[in-house]
Structure formats: C-alpha cells, structure tokens
Image (tube, grey):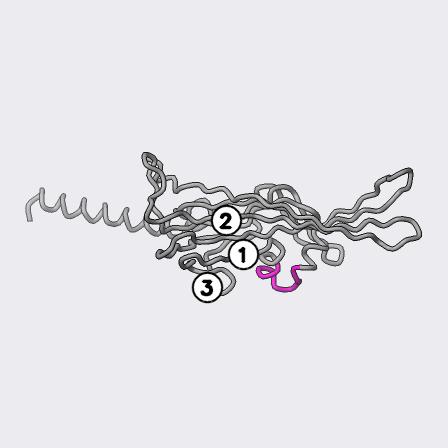
C-alpha cells in the first residue's frame, strides 16, 4: 500500500469517526433547543391568586383561578403533520403548595419536555384532526399524583410557554409556506374562575374567557 493510499484510508477513517461522534452528540442533545423542526408557541397562565379589595367602602376577599387550554389542528385536507417534541417552560417564578412544600420553577426553567407518547400526546395529527390540552392537565399527567383541579387550586398563578416542535410542511424564506402542505395551527383559550366573598354573605362566583392565536415560527434551517 502506497503512502498516499494509506493517508487516504486513515483520513477517511478519521472523518467517519468524527461524523459518528457528531451524530452521537446530536442524538444525545435532545430538547426543545436542539430538536429541529418548525415551532408552534403559545403563552398562558395557570394557578390561583387571592387578595383583598374594597368595593363601595366594603372590604371583600377575591380569589381567581386560571388555566389555559391549547387547541391545535392540522389544517391540511390530505396530509399528516408530525409532532416531534413538546416543552412547557416557566415564564416567571412559580411554586405549587403540596402540604407546605412543592416544586418551584424559575423564569425560563423547563417544567417538562419530551417527545410524544402516542397516548396523551399524539405522534401525528391527521387531516383536520384537532388535539387540545390544558396546562393543569399536562402538569398533572407529568407529575402523576395530583389532579388538574389540584394544580389549578394549589399552584401560584404563573405564566407558561408551551412549545410544540413539528414537521411535515415546507417553508422557504423566499416564498413562505408551501401551498400543498399547510402549517400546524393553534389557538390558546384562557379560562378564569372568580370568587368574590362579601362580609356575612355567600361567595359570588364569576367566569370569564379570552382567546388568542398561537404563534408559528419556521425551522431556522429553512429561512434561506
């Protein structure tokens, strides 16, 4: 074997070794930051807050519970879209009170993230299929010991980001989204239950809801 041939063989082996190592690192670095794909992002609140207020010189106790539902659909008529990864991220510092002590998260900290399981989180959404989940439902499913109602009633009112990484539609920085495969679409609906307690009277209950569209961001690699 000539010196040139030996050099080429060794060089090829080194390159293949580096590629394998890089592939291992990419595989190991799973998470909402490293997982490639388009992202559908929503922001909502979940938890409880209590405070005193004065109405017509009368002091009342106000309690508000909030939970946000994310409703996601595949708008295509004949193509499926794949869900790659989900992440729930704390938007501010928040704690849950489980008998005097519970989990706490700082702003920007991951509450939970994982790929779909095929049961609670579908692997794919078929044509016009709709999937929805509340923040309290998601946290209850992850934690496994407390109900969604307990999360809504025991956690401090906090803000959260739901990040859904998905694939199946083509995007170009020059032409935008492909007309043959439409991008994943989503809405967020925040529900608020209120209790107003006046002196010597039963609590007065109230309910309100608001909706907003989730934001869509194409894969960074498809911008150009």
Q: Nearer the viewer, residue 192 or 112?
A: 192
Viewer-nearest of labels 3 and 1? 1
Where in the figure is residue 215, as x and y percent of width and height?
49, 42
Q: CA distance from mark 3 to mark 1?
A: 14 Å
- Which residue is painted at 45% across and 53% down in the image? 85
Where in the figure is residue 33, as x and y percent of width and height?
45, 44
Name which of mark 3 and mark 2 comes first in the sequence: 3
User: Given contact means CB atoms under 8 Å apart, are the residues at marks 3 and 2 in contact?
Assistant: no
Viewer-nearest of labels 3 and 2? 2
- Which residue has dot 3 on it? 118
Which circle marks residue 176 in the picture? Answer: none
Q: Is 185 inside the magenta-drawn segment?
A: no
Where in the figure is residue 124, as x and y percent of width and height?
41, 59
- Which residue has dot 1 on it? 132
Quadrant housing the C terminus: top left
Q: What's the magenta region?
A: 140-148
Splitting the image into 4 quarters, where does residue 153 fall?
A: bottom right
Q: Residue farthest to the right?
A: 200
Name which of mark 2 and mark 1 comes first in the sequence: 1
Q: Residues within 10 Å of mark 2 (few under 14, many from 20)?
A: many
Where in the figure is residue 120, as x and y percent of width and height?
52, 62
- Which residue has dot 2 on it? 186
Q: Nearer the viewer, residue 51 or 204?
A: 204
| SS under mark 1 | strand
Q: Residues within 10 Å of mark 1 (few under 14, many from 20)?
A: some
| SS under mark 3 | loop
Q: Residue farthest to the front?
A: 77
- Please, is residue 101 above or below residue 171 in the view? below
Q: Nearer the viewer, residue 77 or 192?
A: 77
């Amino acid at each position: 074997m000539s010196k040139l041939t030996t050099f080429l063989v060794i060089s090829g082996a080194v390159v293949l070794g580096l590629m394998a190592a890089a592939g291992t690192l990419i595989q190991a670095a799973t998470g909402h930051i490293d997982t490639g794909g388009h992202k559908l992002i929503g922001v909502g609140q979940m938890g409880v807050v209590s405070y005193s207020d004065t109405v017509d010189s009368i002091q009342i106790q106000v309690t508000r519970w909030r939970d946000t539902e994310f409703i996601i659909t595949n708008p295509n008529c004949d193509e499926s879209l794949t869900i790659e990864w989900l992440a729930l991220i704390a938007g501010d510092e928040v704690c849950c009170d489980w008998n005097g002590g519970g989990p706490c998260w700082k702003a920007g900290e991951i509450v939970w993230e994982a790929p779909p399981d095929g049961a609670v989180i579908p692997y794919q959404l078929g044509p016009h299929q709709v999937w929805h989940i509340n923040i309290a439902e998601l946290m209850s499913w992850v934690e496994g010991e407390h109900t969604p109602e307990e999360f809504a009633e025991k956690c401090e009112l906090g803000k959260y980001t739901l990040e859904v990484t998905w694939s199946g539609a083509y995007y170009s920085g020059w032409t935008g989204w492909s007309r043959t495969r439409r991008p994943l679409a989503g809405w967020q609906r925040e529900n608020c239950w209120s209790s107003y307690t006046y002196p010597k009277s039963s609590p007065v209950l109230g309910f309100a809801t608001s909706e907003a569209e989730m934001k869509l961001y194409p894969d960074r690699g498809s911008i150009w």
